[in-house]
Image: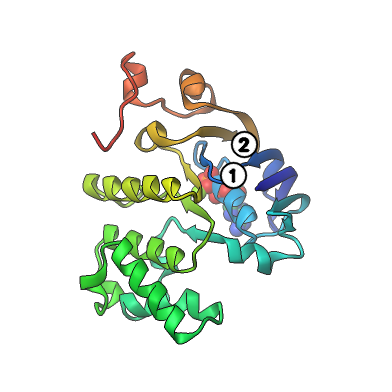
Amino acid sequence: MIEIKNLHHRYPDGTYALKGIDLAISGGEFLLICGPNGSGKTTLIRLISGLLKPTSGSVHVNGFNTLNESKQVRGLMGMVFQDPDSQIVGETVREDITFGPENLGLSKQEIDERVDWALRAMGLETLSEKPCYHLSGGEKRRLAIAGVLAMKSRVILFDEPFSFLDYPGIQEVLRFMIQLHREGHTLIVTTHDVEKVIAHVDRIAVIHDGELKISGSPEGLLMKLPEFGIRPPCYALLGKEKFSWLE
Ligand code: ADP
Ligand code: MG
């Protein structure tokens, strides 16, 4: 579903953030992209979503090239940014969720149905008229996911989804991810902190210094992570069985 070929990205100030990434992501896959700070994770998912254009190389989503077919690509993609505040556009919770589907040019009835459904799915019904700036960190993250759901995005990109969240907030986001994965969405999650989600993903891709170092099943790669500046989950360090943050 997503084909990344020899992808390079250089920022205008000369920073060479991605150096030849090749990666294919299947429909319905739950992929974890991990790497230390500054390794290029956010740059990579911004390129996948079409928000950034490659310096060279290509990203295709369902056959559409992000370079010149970004409109079609954006119709398939939803992005949950690292900082939930940067994503809030509405005054109230309902207004904020309405913004995306409104931009798709849907009928009023279709918009209302999608917004009600997304509010319910994220457990935000009772907060629907609340001003967004009164929400807690966990509620803001749920709001960001609700906005993406209301767009019916096939692919959902989460950039460091567990930052700013307490333990119950992390569990809540994990539960939604698992549910979205079950419903057939393609999920791509970036983090430097693999512990929280690793038990649930299909595959890990490790990036370091702008290069894709290894990718494969979580079990096979766990003990190789420290070579790339990533801490393996505690259960692996202790030689224990896979352990979920939901247990
Ligand atoms: P990560 O998400 O893994 O922490 P980023 O993709 O944010 O990494 O950053 C990769 C590299 O690109 C870093 O060296 C960072 O400083 C640089 N970078 C990120 N955004 C910009 C930008 N807008 N302009 C210049 N350099 C940037
Ligand atoms: Mg980042």
Q: Residue at x 65, y 62 (%)?
A: 73
Query: Is the residue at mark 2 in contact range of ligand 1, meaning its CB lies under 8 Å from it?
Result: no
Is disc 1 surrounded by few (<14), some (14 to 19) or many (20+) residues within 10 Å?
many
Query: Is the residue at mark 1 in contact range of ligand 1, meaning its CB lies under 8 Å from it?
Result: yes
In front of the other: 179 or 157: 179
Q: Which residue is mark 1?
A: 40
| Above or below: residue 118 compared with residue 41 | below
| Residue 118 visible here | yes
Mark 2 secondary-structure assignment: loop
Q: Residue at x 56, y 34 (%)?
A: 205
In the displayed orientation, state which residue is furthest to the bottom. Answer: 108
* Cα–Cα gap, marks 2 and 1: 7 Å
Q: Quadrant of the C terminus?
A: top left
Q: Residue at x 40, y 60 (%)?
A: 145
Q: Which mark is residue 209?
A: 2
Is disc 2 surrounded by few (<14), some (14 to 19) or many (20+) residues within 10 Å?
some
